[in-house]
Amino acid sequence: MPSINPKTLWEAKPHTLAKIEIVGRYLYLWFSILGAHGSNKRLVYIDGFAGPGRYTNSDRSSPVAALQAAKDAIQQSKANLQGVEFAFLFVEKQRDFADSLRNIIESEEWPPEVKWRVEHGSFEDKVGGILTNLRTSGAKLAPTFAFIDPFGATGLPFRVVAEILSYPKCEVLLNLDSDGIGRVLTAQQFEKNQAHLDALFGDQSWKDLDPSKPMATLAADVLALYKRRLRSLPDVEYVFAFAMNSREGQLNYHLVFAVDKTGSYSFSDDSFAQTMLFDFKAPAEWAVKMQSALSGSWRPYSDFQKYALNETPFINPKAMFKHLNGMGKLQVQWKGQPSKTGFPEEKINSIFIAT
């Protein structure tokens, strides 16, 4: 993604195409699983910085990927998704981009269950306004997945993110330009950006960041602080972030994923392959990190589950358990006879990882 607001179509870099693929794959599961529950009669997708709907080198954008995910879920699970409305809100600040996106969506045929609209305006005004109206009227927000992908280090108000996550079954995937935020902090006249930083973090905790650190370290500190701010929210339990790098290995930004305590990221059915949720490396690297963080004492399974969700790309710690067990580093206190099929949570009292 360009670091400034573009005025014409631009080329989608490999990390951008990967990001779109992540959104589409995850939403297919999200729509399929939440839609199959009879209590969820309406599912909402919000794209806060929707863009023009295509790139110079690709017709697949996040809005198109989201709509296609719903279409695929409906067509492949028709019996289970009857009576569910799929509502899409696409917000775009640049009018000609909003018009372009509207024309692209209108050129395709979507199932009758899919309802969509493109709004011209800012994410803060449009989505923030909807949330304010809901709050003042006492209404509730339907299960919502919000994709918030701003240009650069501004335009991402913490208060709006926090309010989305205050509702049950709501999730947020956002682009945190941690490197760009670091550059703002090291700017000679960064004082003019203090209001942006206050809005981004929802307070002045950013003043504890040390702009004299090397940029790579500062960017990591920015990410860590933002994750802490999300975890400080009373309704948020899981926050995970992963880096989106260029082909040269340079950090472009972090994708940060946050789920309220009732969100659907508790996917635990092994029939849903973890590789469909996020792209990640083999478990060895992550197992070593979990060993470093949680070794030396007996712990309940829930400690490892929370670590897996918050600090790794995995939805549960089982693959990392398997790796550590193969190294002779894992001990398990079982409820009854040891399992022969892995590490089912319901059969485990506690786990010990050796250093």
Image (cartoon, rainbow, N blue to C red):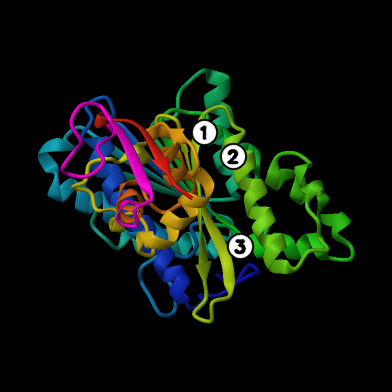
Give the distance between the C-alpha atoms of the residues marked 2 and 1, in whole angstroms: 7 Å
Placement of 14 over or under 317, stated as above or below: below
Secondary structure category for the residue under label 2: helix
- Residue positioned 36% across, 53% down in the render: 324
In the rendered structure, which segment of residues is drawn in magenta? 325-346
Q: Position of residue 343 (x, y in %)?
A: 26, 41
The residue pinned by badge 2 equals: 230
* Residue type of the residue flagged with mark 1: Val
Placement of 13 over or under 66, stated as above or below: below
Q: Do the CB atoms of the residues marked 2 and 1 lie less than 8 Å apart?
A: yes
Which sits in the foreground, 85 or 228?
A: 228
Residue 90 lies left or right of residue 86; in this view the side is right
Q: Which mark is residue 236?
A: 1
Which sits in the foreground, 216 or 152?
A: 216
Secondary structure category for the residue under label 3: loop
First along the sequence among labels 3 and 1: 3
Residue 241 lies left or right of residue 64; in this view the side is right
Give the distance between the C-alpha atoms of the residues marked 3 and 2, in whole angstroms: 21 Å
First along the sequence among labels 3 and 2: 3
Q: Within 10 Å of the Cα at label 2, are there few (<14), some (14-19), or many (20+) other Cα atoms? A: many
* Residue type of the residue flagged with mark 3: Phe
- Residue positioned 23% across, 57% down in the render: 109
Which mark is nearer the camera, 3 or 1? 1
- Residue positioned 27% across, 40% down in the render: 268
The residue pinned by badge 3 equals: 151
Q: Within 10 Å of the Cα at label 1, are there few (<14), some (14-19), or many (20+) other Cα atoms? A: many
Give the distance between the C-alpha atoms of the residues marked 3 and 1, in whole angstroms: 25 Å
Q: Do the CB atoms of the residues marked 3 and 1 lie less than 8 Å apart?
A: no
